Image: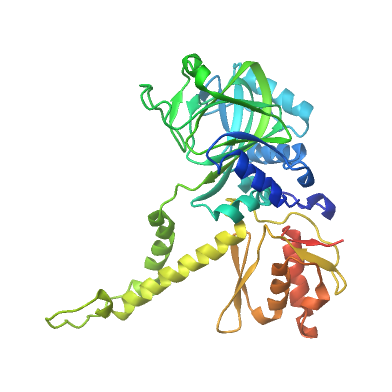
Amino acid sequence: MSTATADISATYFPVVPAAFWEQAFDATEGCTRPAVLKVPERSGQLFPMEDVLALGANIINAGDVSVNVDGTLLKNPVLPGTPPTTVEEFERYLSDLAEQNNAQAVTYTRDYCLRHSDRVAMMTRSFISGYVDRRGIPAPGINVVYIAGHYQETWIGLHNDACNTFLVPVYGRKKIMLWPPEYFADAGLEEKAAFNGVCFGHVDVLPYAADAVVLEAKPGEILFIPENWWHYNQLPTAETSLALSIGVFSNGTPAAAVQPAIKAALQMPQFNQRAESYNRLPGGVIDSLADVALPTAAQNILQAIQDSLSLQILAGSTSSGVIGGGGTLREVPVLSADTSLRGRPDCPVILLHAGDGSGLLFALGAMTKQPAAAQITCLIERLASGDPFLLGDAITQPEHAETVITLARTLCARGILDLDG
């Protein structure tokens, strides 16, 4: 996980301009065609090399890494001693990884990698927020894959993914051959196991090369791959690259979405006691099932499921559907009534009032209990406006100051609000 930095300016995350997404949707014909997108200059480098290498180091140190050599996934790979933190160390690490595993081509990867870096998770939210504004929160969510390696061909072979993919090169280039979803329908290729799509493995793609769309992206560019498009990376010789693959998964079902809420409700103690008998209804004609009164316990279960789903939507809205991250990013200086703050549009904060004066605060996909919701209401409203404000203007009563300042510090440390100016 990320380590907080004392330099608060180092963790300001740029807001990608709306024009970028307008151009992106035009270039991809509404996310139906592959394209290379230019990283907007105003946003700076989306994922700085040092942050992505730090993410990789966290993955390796946690023992949560997948290593593929010469097209084979290793169960017990031999890893060099120290994870790389510079470009030179990265090149050497890959060379040592290949040598120690008797291989030519090597990759090390991690799905759901954002659990290993709050900083990169926040960068991802900053980038993808404009997509979410236009397309909504995807279900089951947005997953990021860390991909580092020295290879000539895609390590898993010809495959597709059940997601819209934004492939972001951080070091080196990505040159991809792409075919539309229906292209291989009658090719008679054998399907192999795949994590989130269909894989044909290492096949000779030369017979299909003339029909391929070939795109190349380098740092400062983003290669967009539409959902279910077949793709294969094939270079003249082995090259070193480091990239993040942002997968926007919208292939979930309503049934899958409600399962956690149903499971949670069914496990509540009050719904696992002896059921009460209900009255037998007389014979006759009814006009609607709405005329059938459910037992009180059944009504309460349905209400509990609905409440759980509502909480799920609130949490998802504050994370933009991004899976992972949410911890402390930076140390925060002393805040006072004269400190100017601004909320971030890509990190909305939502406060749900409860009847007893407490509340539930939703931020970056997490929910926390707030014992004095009224004291922080003005702060949350100010953050939602998106305009800069003085912290003192969010303190409605002198006795509320400590509660408001403490929450503001916490949100600032997590990157949810910024110091303005």
Judging depth in this view, the residue of 264 and 184 nearest the camera is 184
| Residue at the image point whose x is 75% and y is 60% from the top | 413
Q: Is residue 261 left or right of 330 when viewed as pictured?
A: left
Q: Position of residue 95 (x, y in %)?
A: 69, 20
Q: Is residue 418 left or right of 223 when viewed as pictured?
A: right
Q: Position of residue 213 (x, y in %)?
A: 56, 25
Task: Place residue 406 in its image quadrant.
Answer: bottom right
| Residue at the image point whose x is 46% and y is 65% from the top | 309
In this picture, is 155 found above or below 46? above
Q: Position of residue 282 (x, y in %)?
A: 13, 83
Q: Does residue 96 appear in this view?
A: no
Judging depth in this view, the residue of 184 and 372 nearest the camera is 184
Q: Position of residue 119 (x, y in %)?
A: 71, 49
Q: Does residue 206 appear in this view?
A: yes
Give the quarter of the figure containing the C terminus. bottom right
In this picture, is 293 found above or below 65? below
Q: Is residue 79 left or right of 304 when viewed as pictured?
A: right
Q: How is the image coloured?
A: rainbow
Q: Residue furthest left?
A: 283
Q: Exactly how many numbered labels are in the figure? A: 0
Q: Is residue 49 left or right of 234 when viewed as pictured?
A: right
| Residue at the image point whose x is 58% and y is 39% from the top | 28
Judging depth in this view, the residue of 334 and 305 nearest the camera is 305
In this picture, is 218 found above or below 372? above
